[in-house]
Amino acid sequence: MIIVMKSGCPQQEIELLFTELCRWSVVPEVSVGKDKVAIILVGDTTEIDTQQVQNLSPFIEQVLRINKPLKRASLEFRYGETSPLAKSVKL
């Protein structure tokens, strides 16, 4: 799940939201971009209601549920080609 914060969101609001999210059974990671801040929730978010997250702060612009885990590792993302690392690992 990704939480996109509104432009101009105060740092204190991000810290409060981060503290609240740490109480849930997920690990929040903050990604600061040029114009926006995103908080990525790592872990099982299937039981978390996106509207509940949206209601945590008026500075939340959007809450996005990620439907496909491990996008970069997927064959779809790699156009059907396996990773060079996977080719070098022999089980």
Image (spheres, rainbow, N blue to C red):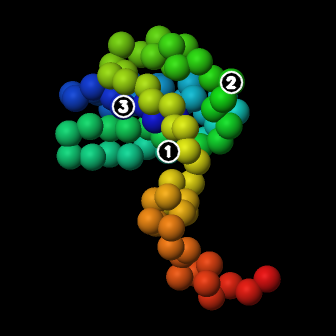
The residue drawn where x is 74% and y is 86% is 90
Give the number of the disc on residue 29. 1
Three-letter amino acid code at the position of disc 1: Glu
Residue, disc 3: 4
Specify which label sits upstream in the sequence, 1 or 2.
1
Horizontal and vertical percent for residue 85? 57, 81
Observer-side mark, 1 or 2, equals 2
Q: Residues within 10 Å of mark 3 (few under 14, many from 20)?
A: some
| Secondary structure of the residue carrying numbered label 3 | strand
Q: CA distance from mark 1 to mark 2?
A: 19 Å
What amino acid does circle 3 point to?
Answer: Val
Q: Does the image show residue 15?
A: no
N-term-proximal mark, 1 vs 3: 3
Q: Position of residue 54 (x, y in %)?
A: 45, 16
Please state the horizontal and vertical placement of residue 37, each as a whole percent of the image.
Answer: 32, 38
Q: Compute the Cα span from label 2 to label 3.
A: 19 Å
- Which amino acid type is shown beneath numbered disc 2? Glu
**Residue positioned most to the right:** 91
Instruction: Name the residue located 55 percent from the left edge and 14 percent from the top edge.
Output: 52
Q: Which residue is mark 2?
A: 47
Image height of 11 relative to 83, above or below: above
Residue 87: % across, % down: 61, 84
